[in-house]
Amino acid sequence: MRRALPICLLLLLCSPAACGRNGKRHTDWVEIRTPHFRILTDGSVERGSAVGAQLECSNEILSAKFVTDGNQPAPPLYVVAFRNASEMRQVAPLGEGEAVRLGGLFLDTGSGRFIGIDLSTQNLNHIVAHEYSHSLVSSAGGQRLPLWLQEGLAEVFAASVTGESEIFESGPPAKKIPAMQLLGFREDSHEYKEQAFHGAFYSQASLTAEYLWMDQEHKKRLLTYLELTRGGKPIEVAVQQAFQKSGAELNRAVAEFASQRRRARPAAKGSCTKVAGEIVPVSDLDAQARVAEFESQTAEHLDDAIHKLESILSENPKNEIALRGLAYGLWRRGDLKQASESFARAADANPTDANLLYLSAALDTDGAHDQPAKRQRMQTALLKAISLNPDFADAHHWLSLTYAWDGDYLAASDEGKRAVELDPENEQFKFNLAAFYAHSQRWSEARGLCEGLAAASNKDVVSQAEALLKQIEHAQLEREANDSSPTQGVQ
């Protein structure tokens, strides 16, 4: 039996901090704190606590059983449990001009991970487990997975937590989706946004994902398929080359797999550890800021979210959530000058957020080449970001650039080398490191990197590397005169 959690309710007058932007009174917001999650909710404590318990259970089972490569959800992960479907529409994507009806939603746009839950939805546990699964499988190897695989794996993993699947237990889908169509679906696909199409899509995606991902031999072929499609191969060609099957043959293989397993999900083995939760009141202004930050993750709601965040900051200029949300929102909208200023303010308010510190520096490069004071500010922010996250490749890269602008190519080489070690696939990092080596007259190391970039996928990098190689050859010929040095700039 679930024990009721204590809560302290505050009686608030309808002041600006306790009411919405239009003066309408809002339900009190609370934050439910479990060992690994913080759930912001304006719904009932009982339903919000159920979300927290299911998140903890999902984390316990999935982290142990499925995530074997260290692919854990990177903080921060924000969870908002809305009391009903009307509240949930604030963050839901639009389909044909109207908010899509969703029981749950997961978004990851780089500024944070957001889970939204409609507390009035049926099968709450399954939806919570599904959305949390997205935070574990939304990317693999630094690459975003295609829509069918994201949703299919989330459904498979969620069923392993709850021991059930509403999709499969409702019987076979009324409509079959051909493999070639399923594999080509994107978030903006008209069919995907059709409510009536969702059951068939999720059912087919789940079957296909389980068939291809859970078997090791099939998974190897799937990873080959993903590499081929990321390299520009058409889906039909990639399927044939990776799976040695036509689209029709893949359809039949998945159908046979479904028949053999009879659409049954085994219940998750073992039971989850029961956890205690703490209920903490949250100011309406902070709650509105978090919801507005959530809204800003989608293009459809971005402008409205920025307006709300600016309104919140007009009441409380130091609201940390709103400062952070506004900075990312402006950046996402392309207002880079305003975003740079906002990131600086947000970093001051959130001095332990490595991403904010990094972006406050990376977006403030105008004139940094010939402004020592600005370079010093950038270096201070970047060094602080690295102290908080030593494996922050982009921060090491930008720090290397500031040292190069100072003319300190030895320090630039050290930081550039670290950036390449952390992100060995980044071709621009490698070229910049080659340029630092060349400026330091470390010819062999510079030459080795340039030669390795001859087959780079970025053609601009190929051209830059070829030009730098010629300068290195010329400089080596005149080395004794010591009157020439590569002048190729870095980016």
Image: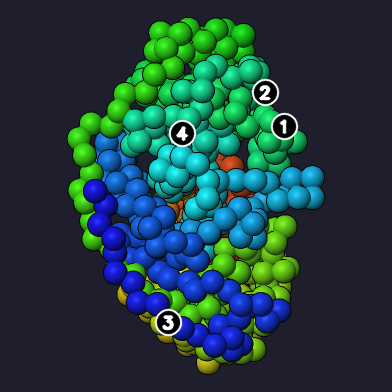
Residue located beneath label 3 in the image: 10
Tell us which disc is closer to us: 3 or 2. 3
Q: Position of residue 87 (x, y in %)?
A: 61, 60
Task: Name the residue rendered at 24%, 48% in the picture.
Answer: 1
- Vertical relation: 251 (above or below) 43: above
Q: Earlier in the sequence, mark 4 or mark 2?
A: 4
Q: Earlier in the sequence, mark 3 or mark 4?
A: 3
Q: 259 and 378: which one is in front?
A: 259
Amino acid at the residue labelled 2:
Gln
* Structural distance between the alpha carbons of marks 3 and 1: 46 Å
Residue located beneath label 1 in the image: 191
Tell us which disc is closer to us: 3 or 4. 3
* Structural distance between the alpha carbons of marks 3 and 4: 39 Å
Residue located beneath label 4 in the image: 155
Tell us which disc is closer to us: 4 or 2. 4
- Vertical relation: 130 (above or below) 295: above
Q: Residue furthest right?
A: 97
Helix, strand or loop status at disc 3:
loop
Residues at discs 3 and 4 in contact (Cβ within 8 Å)? no
Residue located beneath label 2 in the image: 181
Q: Earlier in the sequence, mark 1 or mark 4?
A: 4
Task: Name the residue rendered at 33%, 37% in the picture.
Answer: 161
Q: Earlier in the sequence, mark 2 or mark 1?
A: 2
